[in-house]
Image: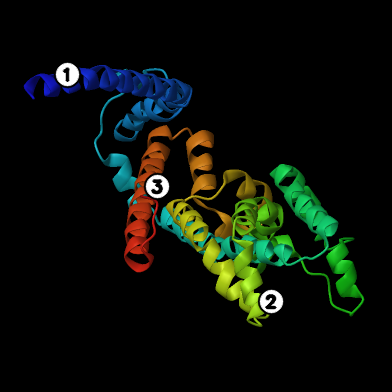
């Protein structure tokens, strides 16, 4: 019996060694594929973090990071006590709130409506056309909308003139600017942002719709009970990622659309940092602001993820 057991053990060892060898080769190949991405992440994401130390220095380009004097939390205290910064923070949060409320929901609605189109060719053309504005630069988009909204010969004011309505200066009205900037953002990115939702909807089991039709469910009921529940995981994922950037707004969009008349409602953190950082050369102050901005975004992501897992059982990790 002992000889038989020993023979079995000796027979298993070569097989186990072969499995380990195959496993190592597989894992090595996967890490080899992942290596370029990890290298780029290290070079362009983690190594530049060394520059965060500028926030704790009176940085001088001539002295460099190693030669600039350390000042501790001086710059953090400076922008915290600056009333202009808090106004800028307020503008950033308000515009981001509108972006989430309207801009985030717009691709969801668009994807559902486009999915309900029955004519295949028209459906594909609609989706393709909706992607195109995403590839236009913000400079081009701003030029187009300035022309459309021009009080002199803009298309919108021409149409308002048909009803004897006086021309409206859309781009210089503080009350209208935030709505305008959010609307332009929706027009530019609604189709592109809906791509993931199109993919999710395409992956929903068609037998569910067939069973719903047999049970007499209307199109609206099918959307509410099948399409939307199937989209929920992707909606939560994208919403969590969107909340992580609630303290940030793209610089280009605000810079090309704003003007001195509406600066009170259009000046956000990105344009504020550009003005005092690049134009006034206050590099340490702007680095401190960017550092706090990143930390707040990270904390928002962690908090939102925990809340999502508690309420819905789904999260990023």
* Residue name at image x 84 percent, y 75 percent: 166
Q: What is the residue that sits farthest to the bottom in this orientation? A: 216
Q: Which mark is residue 293?
A: 3
Task: Residue 69: name its quadrant.
Answer: top left
Q: Between marks 3 and 1, how big is the CA–CA gap?
A: 65 Å
* Comes first in the chain, label 1 or label 2: 1
Outermost residue, front side: 1
> In front: mark 3 or mark 1?
1
User: With respect to residue 77, does 232 lie above or below?
Assistant: below
Q: In this orientation, does residue 178 appear?
A: no
| Badge number at residue 219 | 2
Question: Disc 1 to disc 2, how far (Cα)?
Answer: 67 Å
3 vs 2, front mark: 2
Q: Is residue 289 visible?
A: yes
> Which structural element holds mark 1?
helix
Distance from the alpha carbon under mark 3 to that under mark 2: 44 Å
Counting residues from the N terminus, which is met first, the one under dot 3 or under dot 2?
2
On the rendered structure, is 136 left or right of 89? right
- Which mark, residue 313? none
- What residue is disc 1 on? 7
């Amino acid at each position: 019996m002992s000889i038989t057991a020993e023979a079995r053990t000796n027979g298993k060892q070569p097989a186990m060694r072969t499995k380990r060898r195959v496993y190592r080769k597989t894992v090595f190949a996967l890490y080899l594929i992942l290596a370029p991405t990890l290298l780029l992440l290290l070079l362009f994401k983690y190594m530049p973090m060394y520059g965060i130390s500028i926030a704790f220095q009176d940085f001088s380009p001539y002295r460099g990071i190693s030669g600039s004097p350390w000042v501790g939390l001086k710059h953090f205290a400076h922008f915290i006590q600056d009333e202009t910064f808090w106004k800028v923070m307020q503008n950033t949060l308000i515009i981001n709130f509108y972006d989430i409320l309207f801009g985030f929901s717009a691709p969801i609605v668009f994807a559902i409506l486009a999915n309900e189109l029955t004519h295949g060719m028209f459906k594909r053309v609609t989706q393709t056309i909706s992607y195109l504005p995403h590839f236009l630069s913000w400079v081009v988009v701003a030029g187009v909308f300035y022309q459309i909204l021009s009080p002199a010969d803009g298309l919108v004011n021409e149409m308002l003139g048909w009803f004897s309505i006086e021309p409206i200066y859309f781009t210089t009205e503080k009350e209208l600017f935030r709505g305008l900037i959010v609307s332009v953002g929706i027009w530019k990115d609604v189709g592109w942002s809906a791509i993931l939702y199109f993919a999710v909807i395409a992956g929903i089991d068609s037998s569910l719709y067939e069973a719903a039709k047999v049970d007499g469910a209307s199109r609206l009921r099918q959307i509410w009970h099948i399409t939307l529940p199937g989209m929920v995981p992707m909606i939560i994922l994208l919403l969590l990622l969107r909340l992580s950037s609630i303290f940030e707004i793209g610089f280009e969009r605000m810079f090309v659309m704003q003007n001195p008349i509406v600066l009170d409602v259009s000046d956000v953190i990105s344009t504020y940092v550009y003005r005092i950082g690049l134009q006034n050369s206050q590099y340490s102050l702007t680095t401190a602001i960017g550092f706090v901005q990143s930390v707040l975004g990270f904390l928002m992501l962690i908090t939102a993820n925990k809340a999502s897992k508690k309420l819905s059982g789904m999260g990023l990790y």
